[in-house]
Amino acid sequence: MDFSQSAEELLTKLDTYREQLAQVEEALEQQPDEPSLVKLKNDLTEVIVLTEDLVKYQAAAPTEAEQAGAETAGTTGRASVVPQPVTSRSAAKSVHTALIGRTCEAFFEQKWYNGEIKSVRRDERGQERAMVEFIGFSNQREFKVTDLRLLRPPHPAQCQPGTRCQAIFPEDGLWYDCVITEQTEKGYKITFIDYGSKAEVRFDQIRLQSSGKVGTAKRTIKEVTTPAGYKIPESMQIQKTDTEDIIDAKRRKITAIKKQQRTDKLETEHVKQQTAWQKFFYKKASARSKCGFMSGKPKDSIFKVPDALEGRVGFMNSGQEMTKFNEARKFTYQYV
């Protein structure tokens, strides 16, 4: 791999590699046992990882102009700085722009957390540092760019509406099963399967399952059911070691989760009532039921035109004559 390439070229090649990987994965779904496709997928994955590492390396490595300026300042004893070339500035700026807004994994307190890169700066030692905000929490912390793990977004062709995948829940930053409902300019609109809540996430905040279809493995995230019937993630429980800020954040998230579940429950009940009323209103009347309003069975007119050619207008039933009765006579009782 050429290490003299600019940041723009690396990012362009990275997008190309990802598109090729998406095409190979689609071909593997048709021929999963093809050894050439499996080898090509492994090679592309390795190239993508190396290219991402090179992008982070270029962002973290100080430019030659800054190194020369530091050496000159050390020899002359003056804090003179050699002006940075325009190409180096544009390359560093492009790398910073590419990193800002990306979703990454940061290691904090012996655990990996999902976060979003808010800003990138260069410290006095020439190292690139990124300010990361943990998803679901308002806490921010600064990390070295080389210590972060960027999340790789899947190709949009694999994320059509109706695809089941996993997405980061904005309230706690954990992965949950979801269904993609719509593609947007910023990412995807999804619906979480277990909770029924809807959200919009970025392109790199979703990940596909093994085959992109219904997964057989269940989530390992445990849930806690409250006395009122709400389902709360176990990670939202307040611990003794939590600070006041974390406790307030958890309470706000629990309130939001309960409100969303309450709204979804009311909508479900409303749909059930509406469906029951429609079934009652449009149900078919039995053969013995009366005709008329609210019966579902209209009343036929005796002047209805029959479908058959030999039919006669004004005759009902079988078309036979009316029943004949004997002539009514006065009954006289005869005394014996």
Image (tube, rainbow, N blue to C red):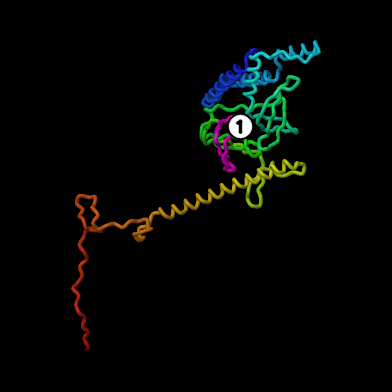
Q: Is residue 249 magenta?
A: no
Magenta span: 186-213
Is residue 301 in view from this perspective? yes
- Amino acid of disc 1: Gln
Which quadrant is the N terminus positioned in? Answer: top right
SS state under label 1: helix
Give x and y (percent) for residue 254.
Answer: 66, 45
Tell me how many marks there are.
1
- Residue at image x 68%, y 14%? 84
Report the side of 55 relative to 321 (left or right): right
Q: Which of these two is toward me, 225 or 217?
A: 225
- Residue at image x 66%, y 15%? 88
Give x and y (percent) for residue 126.
Answer: 73, 19
Residue 228, compared with residue 192, is above or below; it is: below
- Residue at image x 62%, y 44%? 257
Residue 71 image-quadrant placement = top right
Give x and y (percent) for residue 81.
Answer: 73, 14
Q: Can you identify the residue that label 1 sits on? A: 205
Q: Is residue 206 magenta?
A: yes
Give x and y (percent) for residue 190.
Answer: 55, 37
Q: Residues within 10 Å of mark 1 (few under 14, many from 20)?
A: many
Q: Residue furthest bottom?
A: 336
Which quadrant is the C terminus positioned in? Answer: bottom left
Q: Which of these two is toward me, 39 or 89?
A: 89
Report the side of 211 relative to 144 (left or right): left
Residue 223 image-quadrant placement = top right
